[in-house]
């Protein structure tokens, strides 16, 4: 039986053997509606103690309030495990003076407090953020990267790197540099969903040649 992609419009995309939905897993693009957060299709988060549907933004990025400056951009097909936290630049304090104490937030009726750090946090496509990982402010994580459980990511992560530890360091690369370029050029995550379903076997097997052949078929139809 041909593989069929899940419906990207579903909130809870996982169906358990008894036919019930798994409420702890959500497609984030369907539960986060915040102007400074962008999430691609099919990116999901799982939590053993899931928040209500409108609480996922605060659960994953607790310091990125609707009025915060700077953005969180998460690509397509990302996998976010329980306990992951994205500590965005909006959490940073100014410390150029003699103190890092944020006096201004306690005096909102007296002054306007400028946010000291407005940089974006970017997560690429097909990134796996492992259990309890912490992503520090203004980090960029490349496509296909895997972030090990409990890692504290303080620096940018290259495409298709596996990182682990505190601070997180590259343990190994998933693919040779030339193959990373090939996958990024294919950008399978942007293909029509029916073609991604056709590509599942090649994706699971790491068969780049078959994936490239499928991409040519798609191009011929356009």
Image (cartoon, rainbow, N blue to C red):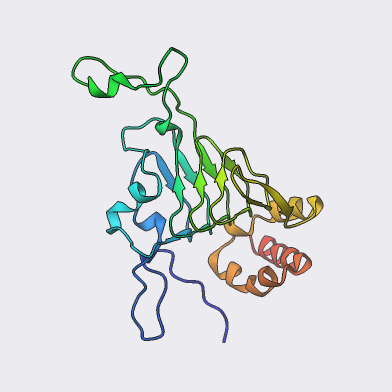
Residue found at x 57% / y 43%: 153
Q: In the rendered view of the protein, which quadrant contains the C terminus?
A: bottom right
Residue found at x 30% / y 19%: 103
Does residue 220 appear left or right of residue 97 in this picture? right
Where does the image place residue 44, in percent across and percent down from the top left?
45, 60
Where does the image place residue 36, in percent across and percent down from the top left?
39, 38
Does residue 213 appear left or right of residue 149 in this picture? right
Taking 152 as reference, is 206 above or below it?
A: below
Does residue 172 appear left or right of residue 139 in this picture? right
Q: Quadrant of residue 192?
A: bottom right
Taking 105 as reference, is 30 above or below it?
A: below
Total numbered labels:
0
Q: In the rendered view of the protein, which quadrant contains the N terminus?
A: bottom right
Taking 170 as reference, is 70 above or below it?
A: above
Where does the image place residue 80, in percent across and percent down from the top left?
48, 57
Residue sitting at the far left: 109
Residue found at x 41% / y 70%: 13
Where does the image place residue 82, in percent across and percent down from the top left?
44, 59
Q: Nearer the viewer, residue 168 or 18?
A: 168
Q: Quadrant of residue 162?
A: bottom right
């Amino acid at each position: 039986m041909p593989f069929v992609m899940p419906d990207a419009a579903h909130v809870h995309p996982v169906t358990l053997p008894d036919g019930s939905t798994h409420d702890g897993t959500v497609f984030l693009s369907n539960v986060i509606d915040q102007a400074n957060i962008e999430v691609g299709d099919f990116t999901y988060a799982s939590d053993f103690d899931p928040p209500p549907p409108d609480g996922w933004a605060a659960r994953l990025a607790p310091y990125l309030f609707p009025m915060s400056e700077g953005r969180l951009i998460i690509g397509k097909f990302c996998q976010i495990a329980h306990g992951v936290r994205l500590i965005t630049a909006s959490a940073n304090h100014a410390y150029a003076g003699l103190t890092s104490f944020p006096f201004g937030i306690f005096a909102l009726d007296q002054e306007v407090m400028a946010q000291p750090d407005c940089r974006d946090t970017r997560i690429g496509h097909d990134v796996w953020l492992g259990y309890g990982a912490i992503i520090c402010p203004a980090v960029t994580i490349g496509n296909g990267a895997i972030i090990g459980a409990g890692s504290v990511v303080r620096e940018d992560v290259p495409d298709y790197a596996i990182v682990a530890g505190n601070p997180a360091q590259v343990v190994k690369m998933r693919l040779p540099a030339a193959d990373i370029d090939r996958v990024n050029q294919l950008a399978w995550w942007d293909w029509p969903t029916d073609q991604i379903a056709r590509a599942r076997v090649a994706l699971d097997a790491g068969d780049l040649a078959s994936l490239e052949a499928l991409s040519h078929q798609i191009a011929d139809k356009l």
